[in-house]
Image (spheres, rainbow, N blue to C red):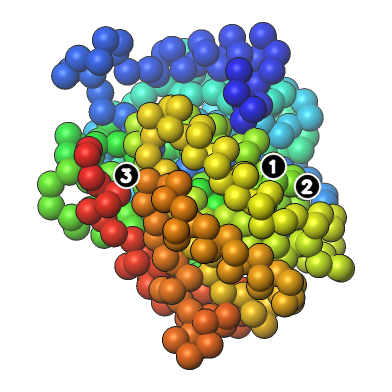
């Protein structure tokens, strides 16, 4: 059993397996097997109510959450993975539905009910995830979907994804199957209880590309609701590419680190890599861009305040990358390394941290340990002062690119390299 697995108890595993069995593609790998890929994903974590780095968990009681998510490819059938991975008590789902998103909280056309082994409700044990039965739905590529989940009882600590860069909606009572927007009077900046949407994609979609990283992969400081994270722009480029292509799953967590976990920013990359990358439907390749927080959180005081100081060396980070590479290769998945983008001027920049960043980047570029390299640092750096983000790409904090910067990062990805051998 791999490190990234959250399901430890036998009973939990049985529940998740039973739900997955209902929705699983036909066995045998025949040409007739459904082409399941991950059209959208967001790494699960404890979701908090008072901002990105609050320690107060969100919770729900007799409420419906409508999550607005962005599908990277089209599909003819859809299934949804729901999570109680970080819950403190069993989670009751009293109803769930999916449809093509309309304006605001509205659903355009049919709001398709979701079932679990043929039943409209399910209880998810602590630490578990469940997969819905497949439903027929014409999913458009590069379009928002609305995934609704009704919580009839007190949910306890909510699992989901804190930094959605998307407006989501909450209604009192059961409105999972309600396509209208009127009841959804509360907005939320996070996704709740859902961590992946899989679709049966056209034959030319050969699998899933996972973008794995921290807030820069999460799209922090991109335009809210516009789907302008760099993984979204990669999806647009891949869809426009003739012939074989890939779906895209964004597995960034803001504040996340390679080697250390904390409440604010998710479990560390080594611990979540299997769950968030290697276990995604149809995964063929992973792009890793992570470690700037390991470097930045080595200074005193750390940012955010909830993240403890952990003085991590460049050698330790490189050892962490080597483990990710070994895990990916053992699973038959290609893995590409992204260079760490400039952060001089950011609140947690230091001269010592800059040396670590440049040491790590040199290893990424010249070690040939990854299956290929994407020089994100060069894509966004000031050409005259490479320790700084180019001003046109600076969101204002000298750490995160703006939407134009994320677009430049996506443009730096060599699609021929990523699609090679599919």
Are circles 2 and 1 on residues that touch, CB within 8 Å?
A: no
Estimate the x, y position of residue 214 in percent, counting from the top left: 59, 56
Indicate the secondary structure of the residue bearing disc 2. Answer: loop
Indicate the secondary structure of the residue bearing disc 1. Answer: loop
Are circles 1 and 3 on residues that touch, CB within 8 Å?
A: no
Whether residue 36 sits left or right of residue 310 in the image: it is left
Which badge, 3 or 2, comes first in the chain's sequence?
3
Estimate the x, y position of residue 125 in percent, counting from the top left: 68, 20
- Residue 306: which quarter of the image? bottom right
- Residue 303: which quarter of the image? bottom right
Look at 43% across and 74% down and name the residue there: 378
Which badge, 1 or 3, comes first in the chain's sequence?
3
Q: Nearer the viewer, residue 128 or 414?
A: 414
Mark pair 2, 1: CA separation: 8 Å
Residue under label 1, please give it: 267
Picture disc at residue 247? 3
Look at 82% across and 50% down and name the residue there: 56
């Amino acid at each position: 059993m791999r490190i990234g697995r959250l399901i430890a108890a036998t009973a939990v595993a049985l529940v998740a397996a039973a739900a997955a069995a209902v929705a699983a593609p036909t066995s045998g790998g025949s040409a007739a097997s459904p082409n399941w890929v991950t059209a959208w994903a967001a790494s699960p974590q404890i979701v908090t109510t008072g901002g990105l780095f609050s320690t107060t968990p969100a919770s729900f009681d007799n409420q419906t959450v409508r999550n607005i998510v962005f599908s990277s490819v089209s599909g003819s059938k859809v299934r949804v993975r729901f999570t109680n991975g970080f819950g403190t008590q069993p989670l009751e789902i009293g109803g769930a539905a999916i449809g093509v998103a309309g304006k605001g909280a509205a659903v355009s056309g049919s709001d398709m009910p979701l079932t679990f082994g043929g039943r409209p409700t399910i209880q998810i044990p602590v630490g578990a995830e469940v997969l819905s039965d497949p439903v027929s739905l014409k999913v458009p590529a590069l379009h928002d979907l609305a995934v609704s989940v009704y919580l009839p009882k007190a949910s306890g600590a909510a699992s989901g994804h804190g930094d959605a860069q998307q407006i989501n909606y909450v209604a009192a009572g059961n409105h999972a199957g309600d396509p209208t927007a009127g009841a959804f009077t509360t907005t939320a900046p996070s996704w709740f209880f859902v961590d992946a949407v899989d679709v049966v994609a056209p034959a030319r979609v050969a699998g899933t590309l996972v973008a794995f990283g921290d807030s820069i992969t999460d799209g922090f400081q991109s335009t809210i609701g516009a789907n302008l994270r760099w993984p979204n722009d990669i999806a647009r480029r891949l869809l426009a590419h003739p012939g074989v292509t890939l779906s895209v799953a964004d597995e960034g967590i803001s504040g996340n680190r390679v080697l250390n976990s904390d409440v604010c920013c998710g479990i560390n990359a080594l611990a979540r890599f299997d769950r968030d990358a290697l276990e995604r439907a149809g995964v063929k390749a992973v792009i890793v861009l992570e470690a700037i927080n390991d470097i930045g959180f080595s200074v005193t005081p750390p940012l955010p305040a909830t993240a403890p100081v952990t003085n991590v060396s460049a050698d330790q980070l490189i050892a962490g990358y080597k483990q990710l590479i070994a895990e990916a290769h053992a699973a038959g998945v290609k893995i590409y390394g992204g260079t760490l983008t400039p952060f001089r001027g950011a609140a947690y920049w230091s001269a010592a941290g800059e040396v670590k960043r440049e040491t790590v980047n040199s290893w990424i570029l010249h070690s040939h340990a990854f299956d290929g390299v994407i020089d994100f640092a060069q894509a966004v750096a000031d050409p005259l002062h490479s320790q700084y983000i180019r001003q046109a790409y600076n969101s204002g904090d000298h750490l995160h690119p703006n939407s134009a910067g994320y677009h430049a990062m996506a443009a730096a990805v060599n699609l021929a390299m990523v699609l090679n051998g599919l």
